Every structure is written in structure tokens, then in C-alpha cells.
Image (cartoon, rainbow, N blue to C red):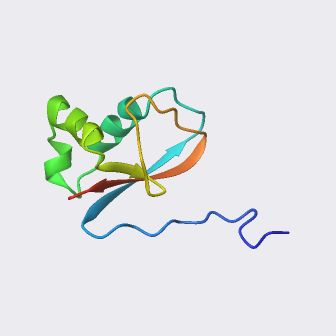
Amino acid sequence: MDAYEGVNHVPPQPPKSFRVTLELHRSAKRLDVVLLNALRNQKENLNLFNITRTTFKQLFLDGRIVIKGQRAKVSSSVAKGITYVDILGY
């Protein structure tokens, strides 16, 4: 049995980033919809709480939204369970 099997492994958070933990009870078709909703429901980072849709989209285009160190796409699907999303520069 692998050491991480059955254990929720939390990837390291990049420096100067804001982490959003998405916990979904079923998969979602688009990351942008789920992530923007999560940002609107958090109070820890008011810059991201009040982010405009244009600025939010630009974060994806600039590669500043990452999952497990990989650039996320607006249209990426999100699996059921816990997903850690890091927004670089916040």
C-alpha cells in the first residue's frame, strides 16, 4: 500500500499566493464557475472577494491560477472531493 493511499495529501502552497480549498460533493464542468463562487464566499482576501470577472479571467490567461503546480484552464473540470487551487500574487 502506498504511503499516500487513502490519505488526503496537501501539496505545498507556493510563496505569495492565496489558497482556495474546493470541496465538491460531485464533479463540476468548469473550474472558473466554481472558483469564482468560492472567492465570493470567502472573507480572508478582500481583493479576491471583490475581483471583477475581467481581472479573474486575466489571472487564468496569465497562468496565475494553478493546481498542483500546473496552470489551470478556465474550462478545466473539477473532480469530486478536495482540490487545492493556488492564486499566485495574492
Left or right of residue 80, residue 23 in this image: left
Left or right of residue 51, residue 87 in this image: right
Among all residues in the image, which is located at the extreme right? 1
Q: In which quarter of the image is residue 19?
A: bottom left
Locate the C terminus and report the quarter of the image it occupies: bottom left
Residue at the image point whose x is 16% and y is 37% from the top? 55
Q: In front here: 32 or 74?
A: 74
Locate the N terminus and report the quarter of the image it occupies: bottom right
Residue 28 screen position, x and y as percent:
52, 30
Residue at the image point whose x is 75% and y is 64% from the top? 5
Residue at the image point whose x is 63% and y is 63% from the top? 8
Residue 13, relative to residue 38: is it above or below? below
Residue 11 screen position, x and y as percent:
50, 65
Residue 10 screen position, x and y as percent:
53, 66
Q: Quadrant of residue 25?
A: top right
Residue 39, relative to residue 69: is it above or below? above
